[in-house]
Structure formats: C-alpha cells, structure tokens
C-alpha cells in the first residue's frame, strides 16, 4: 500500500509554497510520522534531498557544518535538521551571503527554537510552519474552513438539511487520532503502532536530541499526562506521583513539548479580570496516542463518558489549532477558568478580538452550558466576537445570547 499520507491533501501545502517564494529558509516542523518528509518532497520534488536520519550525512554535517552547507546545491531540502543543530549558524551565514528565496527547505521533529544547543537565530531569514497530524477535514478531503468561517462571522443557525455522510463515528475519530500510518490498520494494530512509535521516540529523540539520560521517566510522565489530557496541569502533583523533583518534571515537560507530543494551553487573562486560575491546561497533540496511553477505546464513550469528554476537548483543540496554521497564523489559543468554576475550554484571540469555544459531548446543549461563555463575554465587552458551543448533535442552534451559537462538532470537518 502507498504511504497513507499520500492519500490525503495537506492543507498546509499552499502556506509552504507561498513562503518558499519569498523567504530564504522555510522550516516545516511537526511530530515524527505526521507527513513532513512526504509533504516536503511533494512540494519540491526536483530539489536535492538529504535526511539526517542517515548517520552518514549526520556525521559529515556535524563534523564540518560550514563546509557541508557550502557544498550544497542552490536549492535543497534538509530533513530532520534537529539532529544536526550546528547547521543552523552555517545556514545563517550562507543566507546572509545569498538571500534568494526558497534556498533551504528544512524539516524538523523538534522545535528548533527551543533546542538549548541552538545559539544562532535565523530571525528575519526563516519562516516556520507547523504540520500537525491529519485533521478530520483532511481525512474527509474537505477544505477545513471552520476557523475561517468563525473569523468571518459566517457561522449561522441552521437545521441539518440532511444526515452527515457516512463515516467514522465521533468516538472512532477520537481514538484513531491523526497519524497517517495507523489509519490503515485495525484498532488493535493501530494501538500497537502507537506503542512502537513512542518507544522509538523515547529511544531516539529523547536520548539523542533532548539528551535526557533517564528516558524511562519521560515515558512515565507522558503516560500520566495522557490520563490528564484536557485538564489543569499541576507539576507538583505529577512530581509527587512520579517520585521526582519538581525541576525534573518541568524539564521533562519541556522535552515533550519540544518533540510535539504535548502542549500547554495557557490561561487567558485580562488586566481587568480578577480571580482567575493561572494554571495551564495540558493536551496531548494526538488523541489516538492519548487514547492508547490512557487505555481508552470506542466503548468508553458509553461507559466512561467523563474520561472521553476530556479527550474530546483535546481533540477540538487539536483540530482548531491545526486549521489556524493554514487560516491565520496570528491567532493565539488559551483557556479560561476562574475561581467561581466558570470556564471556557478554548479562547481564541487576535489582537483585541476574542472568541470562545465550549465543548460538550451531549447531543443537544443544556441551558447552563453557555455560562462560561457568558462570563467571558461580559469581561471582554465589545471585544467579544462570538461564543460557540460545540455539541454532538446535528443542528446549529441559536442560544439566548445572540452572540452565542450551538454548532455540531461535525462542522469541524464538514465545513
């Protein structure tokens, strides 16, 4: 079978093409096995290609970065460049001598800007784009325009004119995740792929790239975080459960973020807003991986809905942040929670504009489901644009506050 990512259009492709037309260095970052190498080769099939997963190229480039870069052709793709961070200063020097656009297309499975060994900045010379695992819109070969419609104020009340086309159920989407390879396998084999994937990450990237000696502790931390995906992060609690110092847990968390396995969703606040909870929420970047680590399957949607509810929240966060990458990279993402237990799962901001997203697993909204959105709207005043209550039903329904709308979760991939 062909590589599964070949079967799906990647909506980030036009962003990369545009960047290559006017920027000397374009860097495509994202987790391993998310399709970066395939996308890079599809976008620039005629370029010379070097992968630093090849130990020969890695040794050559590491021993003489300046000489290696000087020997490269005019346009080149360098794959998994985080394995030779010493190349970046050499690329900077090369670009300063010749600033033609599109000279270097880099891919990386670690956030280069967070790597401690990178001392030279490519600011002003490099554009970075993040490729996420496949979104549900990409799986369905749809444009993925939910975020665009939200920003344009184009989401409106609408009764479902027809049933959604046949496809995976919502619980099936949650436990499948977005890595292309396991999508071709049975659920049991997909879980085995996730386990092997993590083992590879721990043995190769955590040890070699992040230079962590006790990689097993990082793996234990990731398992605990999978059980807490979508919840407030308490480093102290994690440290106690793991029997580690708080500083060690913070360092391991930074490694997992650097490798695009987890993200911390910072709390939204405004100077005028008081009594806010300042803890971030933690989300695994792929719900398939999170479900495997947490031991969740499709049947848990009926039997342990509260646990699947947190996974659903992480799922929505993933979908919207991924769509933002090809819609508007200036968007920022937060969560809101105050000491009165009022919360909004996702807050989206652009300059002073604010949108709120609340996620519910029920088929229809309950009267109290928009209380957090209402609190956020009062705090933001005229800057509040719209509140969206995502639910598992089929209709877009108006809520009492005209700035609020209940929208089916399927709009994330059908819009």
Image (cartoon, rainbow, N blue to C red):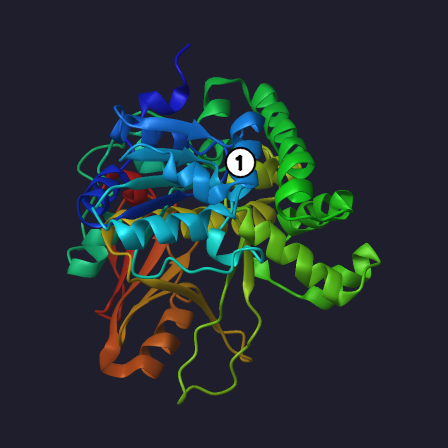
**The N terminus: image quadrant:** top left
Residue 399 in percent (x, y) is at 27, 64
Residue 312 in percent (x, y) is at 48, 47
279 and 362: which is toward the camera? 279
Q: Is residue 54 visible?
A: no
Residue of label 1? 288
**Residue drawn at point x = 60 percent, y = 48 percent:** 307
Picture quadrant where residue 347 is located = bottom left
Q: Left of 374 or right of it: where is 193? A: right
**The C terminus: image quadrant:** top left
Count of numbered labels shown in the rendering:
1
Q: Left of 20 or right of it: where is 285? A: right
**Residue drawn at point x = 67 percent, y = 60 percent:** 251
83 and 320: which is toward the camera? 83
315 and 40: which is toward the camera? 40
Q: Relative to 189, does residue 329 appear above or below in the rendering? A: below
**Residue drawn at point x = 77 percent, y = 62 percent:** 239
Q: Left of 348 or right of it: where is 217? A: right
Q: Relative to 67, does residue 193 appear above or below in the rendering? A: above
Residue 64 in percent (x, y) is at 52, 40
In the picture as drawn, the residue positioned furthest to the right comes out as: 243
């Amino acid at each position: 079978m062909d590589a599964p990512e070949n079967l799906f259009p990647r909506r980030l492709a036009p962003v990369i093409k545009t960047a290559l037309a006017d920027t000397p260095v374009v860097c495509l970052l994202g987790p391993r096995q998310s399709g970066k190498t395939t996308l890079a080769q599809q976008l620039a099939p005629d370029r010379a290609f070097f992968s630093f997963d090849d130990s020969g190229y890695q040794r050559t480039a590491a021993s003489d970065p300046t000489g290696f870069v000087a020997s490269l052709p005019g346009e080149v793709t360098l794959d998994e460049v985080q394995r030779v961070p010493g190349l970046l200063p050499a690329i900077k020097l090369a670009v300063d001598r010749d600033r033609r656009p599109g000279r270097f297309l880099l891919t990386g499975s670690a956030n280069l800007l967070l790597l401690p060994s990178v001392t030279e900045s490519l600011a002003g010379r490099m554009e970075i784009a993040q490729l996420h695992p496949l979104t549900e819109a990409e799986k369905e070969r749809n444009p993925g325009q939910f975020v665009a419609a939200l920003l344009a104020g184009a989401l409106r009340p609408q009764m479902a004119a027809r049933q959604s086309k046949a496809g995976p159920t919502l619980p099936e989407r949650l436990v499948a995740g977005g890595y292309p390879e396991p999508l071709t396998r049975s659920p049991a084999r997909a879980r085995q792929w996730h386990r092997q994937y993590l083992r590879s990450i721990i043995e190769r990237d955590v040890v070699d790239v992040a230079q962590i000696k006790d990689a097993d502790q990082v793996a234990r931390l990731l398992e605990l975080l999978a059980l807490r995906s979508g919840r407030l992060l308490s480093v102290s609690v994690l440290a106690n459960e793991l029997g580690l110092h708080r500083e060690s847990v913070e360092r391991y968390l930074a490694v997992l973020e650097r490798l695009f396995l987890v993200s911390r969703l910072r709390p939204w606040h405004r100077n005028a807003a008081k009594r806010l909870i300042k803890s971030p929420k933690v989300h695994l970047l792929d719900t398939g991986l999170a479900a495997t680590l947490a031991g969740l399957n499709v049947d848990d949607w009926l039997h342990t809905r509260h646990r699947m509810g947190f996974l659903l929240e992480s799922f929505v966060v993933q979908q919207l942040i991924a769509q933002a990458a090809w819609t508007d990279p200036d968007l920022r993402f937060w969560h809101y929670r105050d000491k009165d237990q009022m919360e909004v799962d996702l807050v989206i901001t652009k300059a002073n504009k604010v949108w709120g997203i609340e996620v519910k697993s029920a088929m229809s909204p309950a009267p109290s489901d928009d209380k957090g959105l209402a609190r956020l709207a009062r705090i933001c005043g005229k800057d509040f644009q719209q509140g969206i209550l995502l639910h598992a039903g089929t209709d877009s329904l108006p809520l009492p506050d005209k700035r609020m709308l209940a929208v089916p979760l399927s709009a994330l991939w059908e819009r």
